Every structure is written in structure tokens, then in C-alpha cells.
Image: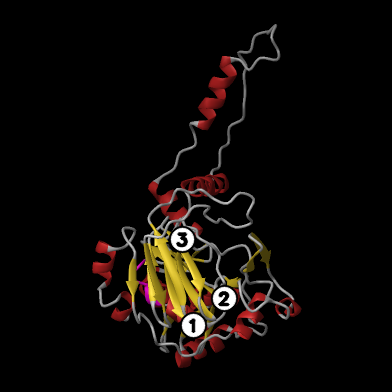
Amino acid sequence: MNKQLLGGLTAAQFLAEYWQKQPLLIRNAWQDFPELIDLPRLIGLAQQDDVESRLIEYRNDRWKLENGPFRPSRFEHLPETDWTMLVQNVNHHVPHIADLLYEFNFLPYTRLDDLMISYAPPGGTVGPHYDSYDVFLLQVGGKKRWQISSDDAGNFVEDAPIRVLKDFTSEQEWILDHGDMLYLPPKYAHYGVALEPGMTYSIGFRAPTEQEIVGKFLEYLQDELRLSGIYGDPERTPTDRPGEIDLAFVRKIETMLKQLTWTEGDVRKFIGRYFTEPKAHVFYNPPEEPLDFEEFAEQVNEHGVHLDLKSQMLYEGDQVFINGEELEVAPAALETLRQLADVRRLPAASYDDDILEALYTCYDYGYLHAGKI
């Protein structure tokens, strides 16, 4: 990690003093841009079916939201002010954006979500709001005024297509220039307005609700549990109240439900699958003319491998997960695959067959690629 990314703080200092505690303004946090994405390229991404994008306008005291993908003609008649275009998961499509996202790898990948880019001309804004997750807001080109408040009263504008706070009183205010970055903890209200044409790179962190976690875990158990019993009531006696749910029936169903148990191993496996599962719009492209195993091994020996930009790979103990699946891994291959999960690539080298077989399985699904990005 480039230490300037956190304003000269170490990762440990930042996590102890600011993470989920208080905002932090970092001047000149990042200048190492191999290239700057321009508006035409961002518009090009917003036209793709596999990209989540939105267009937000504020006119005549009303908010307007459109969801992509967009036709090219949609951008030909936009006004010079007062709109914002947002494109999610740009790290899935642009290698140097993915590299920037993974500069934040002082936090685990279970928490790191995506890098969204928003473009706005002067006056462009998505209104005062707050997020339920941590976010870093990096200004790229132009200037933007940010106002923030610790008040998260949640009084939202009724009938608006986006969550905009009705009442917002600024406690702090800054103007961010190119390369400046603002960190905000969850539920810290913020209001950004573009003063000049420019972009904001938003590095967001995954924070699923308890309801979502529990619901997904129950879905996982439904797929994993194998119960062989069937309802029976040989002791049944006649009833004169057939519409009643009687106590004996309730007790039998209760007994069935008490079989719903799980172990720590179930929880660990669920976490690996759930936190690597791709979003609904994400898909992978297997190689059109796949290399055979020997050809693949030669490519890895000469060029190494790298994960697809859309792939998520995690490990826990002797288990390895990629894109919602558990990977079968020989013990001798574990350490190398953990390295791949941590740094998202492996250098050129002659790897043994246990490692190559696991890599080849991922290659065949389009989860990783041999050679340069």
C-alpha cells in the first residue's frame, strides 16, 4: 500500500483512529494514474448489458433516475449542468482501476466491494444522503464541494426515485481537487456538488444486512441438509374441529424444525461461497479455443496467471473458494492458491501438477487467464 493513500497514516493507525469512527480528509492521496478515464469511455461502459449504470438529474425541484444500459443517443442532448452518471464495478472492466481498488487490500476481500465512477458537470449531484457502508471518495479531475454531517436522521424526500435527505445541515465542508480523497464511516450524511466537470471514484465496502446474511444462510442449509423423515401421526384420534391447528400437530412440526442445526464448518463453507458469489449481472467468458493441459502449463511456465478482473477468490483453512464455488485442492497446492487469492496473480514458474490442475479448472471456466492482463 502507498502510505500517502491514507495521508501518511499506517493501515493500523487508520483502522484504530478512523475506520467506522470518524471522517478523514486526505489531500493528494493518489496521483499514480496510468491513464485518466474520459467521459466517452465511461459512456461506452454505460452502454454494456453487463454493467450497472445510472443517470440522475435534478430539475425543477424534482429528481429523475434512469437505469442503463443506455443508447449512445441518450447522451447527445444532456444539458451542460445538473446531472450525474454513475457506473458500478468499473474494476471489472479496466485493469488499472482494479489495481487501484486492490490498493485497499489492508482490509480483507470479504469487505471490499467495488470501485464506482461517477461523472458530473457543474451542479451535478445525487443529493444529500448517507450510505450503510464505509466509502472512500477520490476526486479525479475537476473540483467538487463536499459537505458532511454526523446526523443520520433518515428523513428522506418522499416519492423521490433515490434516497435523498429532506433535512441536511452541514457540519464540515471541503473542496476536493484532483487526487484528494475523503473517507466516510457508515451512515455519515454527505452532499457532494460538482464545481467543475470531473469524476469521483467511490471505493465501497460490502456490508450486508443481518436479514440478508440469515436469509442466504438458510438458503445454503436448504441445499445442504438431507432429512429423510416424513410426517406421521399413527396415534391420531377423531376430531370435531377439523379447521383447528391442534397442539399435537404444532409439536410435531416443531420437532421437525429442531433438526435444523449447523456446525462451525457449515458457517465457514457458507461464508466462502457467499462472499465470492458474483452479482447477478456478472458472467465469465470461457476461452473460445481453450488450450489443452500441456499448452496451458507451458503458458503458465512462461507468463504466469492472473485472476479475471471479475473473479473473487478467498480461502479459509484448507478450503479455497472462487466465484461462489468450492475448489477441489490437493494439500500440496494450498499455499500457492492462497498466494493467488491474496495478490490475484502468480508469477511465471514451473508449477507441479496439483497446482496446475486447480489452475486449469479455473481457466476452463474463464475465472483466470494465462499470460499478461
Residue position marked by numbered label 1 in the rendering: 142
Question: Label 2 is placed on what type of residue?
Answer: Ala
Please identify the dominant SS of the magenta region: loop
Question: Label 3 is placed on what type of residue?
Answer: Arg
Residue at 51% in and 83% down: 95
Local packing at callout 2 (Cα closer than 10 Å; few below 14, some 14-19, many 20+) is many
Residue 165 percent across, percent down from the top left: 52, 54
Q: Is residue 88 above or below residue 61?
A: below
- Which picture quadrant has residue 82? bottom right
Question: Label 1 is placed on what type of residue?
Answer: Gly
Q: How many marks?
A: 3
For residue 195, which numbered disc appears in the image? none
Residue position marked by numbered label 3 in the rendering: 206
Residue position marked by numbered label 2 in the rendering: 120
Asked if residue 281 lies left or right of residue 15, the reply is: right
Asked if residue 363 lies left or right of residue 16, the reply is: right
Magenta extent: 103-107
Q: Is residue 81 visible?
A: yes
SS type, badge 2: strand
Q: Residue furthest bottom?
A: 302
